[in-house]
Amino acid sequence: MNEKEILQQVRITMDPVFKWVMEQKDNCLRFVQAALPELNIVEIKFQTQKKMHEYLNSKAIVTDILAKDNQGRIFDIEMQITVPNELGKRIRYYQDVLDVSYTPKSTNYKDLVETYIIFIFTEDPFGYGYKKYTSKGIAFNETKDLFLQNGTHLVMLNPKGIKGQVTPDMQQFFNLEQGIFSHKKGYAKQLQDSMVDFSRSPERMKQVMTFQDKLDDIAEATRNKTLKEESIKRLKGNISMLKKFGISAEQIRSEMLQEYSDVLTSEEIEKCVSVLENNDVKS
């Protein structure tokens, strides 16, 4: 395959590709610099797939990229191909784990580590059209001027954004997320070269195939869930209609089992039919 064909199959948003590309130190450093240019970061240490938890019996998290700069600031970088359920509570728990993991017992509150949780999305997570959503500290409902700085920062990156400004390097990353490739020397080309290097290992390509299978499974499960919900709605409507025509419950049961057995289990069909006796079917 030529470079274009490789890049169409090996995408930066794929979990194994993103992690491997960011394991190349300059790729990761430039990403953090692009995401947070105001910090003037010059050096970082990082690791991928870091498993962390507050206590041995508590829920663990596995960070995509966990980095620390030369001033001690912590960066948790996560690639998100979908907007996770309970995004707010997920962020809360990530923050809790970071705090406990990097706070020795004798630490004074003023010495708590400054943390940055960075989520990279493939779609707009909130729908307001901004390229970059940011938050820090604690704001109060009573007045916009009342604010507590507590050393926590959130950054949500949206490649589909049209509002606000990001650095040229971040825009190149956004373009790459969306399958827009660059032939000019720059950050995007640097990342593309790393992606091509990734594809040269059969073992790494197996990881991509496994990841794609997982995505296909998720898509199929979502499709099946939608199909099942639509089938149940139609089933209830048919039951209600047949009942109005005076068809017996036993006849309806037999017809529905035959018609819907390819998409619903017999238990699901029986549950819908059984409400006939209670006169509680809703379309």
Image: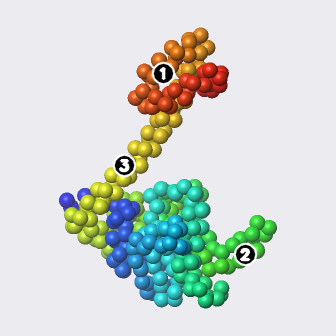
Answer few, some or many: residues within 10 Å of disc 2's Cα (few below 14, many 20 plus, some between 14 and 19): few
Q: How is the image coloured?
A: rainbow
Answer few, some or many: residues within 10 Å of disc 3's Cα (few below 14, many 20 plus, some between 14 and 19): few
Residue 283 found in image quarter: top right
Left or right placement of residue 258 versus residue 103 in this view: left
Residue, disc 1: 256
Answer few, some or many: residues within 10 Å of disc 1's Cα (few below 14, many 20 plus, some between 14 and 19): some
Residue occupying image coordinates x 25% and y 70%? 197
Q: Secondary structure at mark 2?
A: strand
Residue, disc 2: 147
Work out whether 106 lies above or below 220: below
Distance from the alpha carbon under mark 1 to that under mark 2: 60 Å
Residue occupying image coordinates x 40% and y 29%? 262
Give the mark nearest the N terminus, 3 or 2: 2
Residue, disc 3: 216
Residue occupying image coordinates x 54% and y 55%? 85
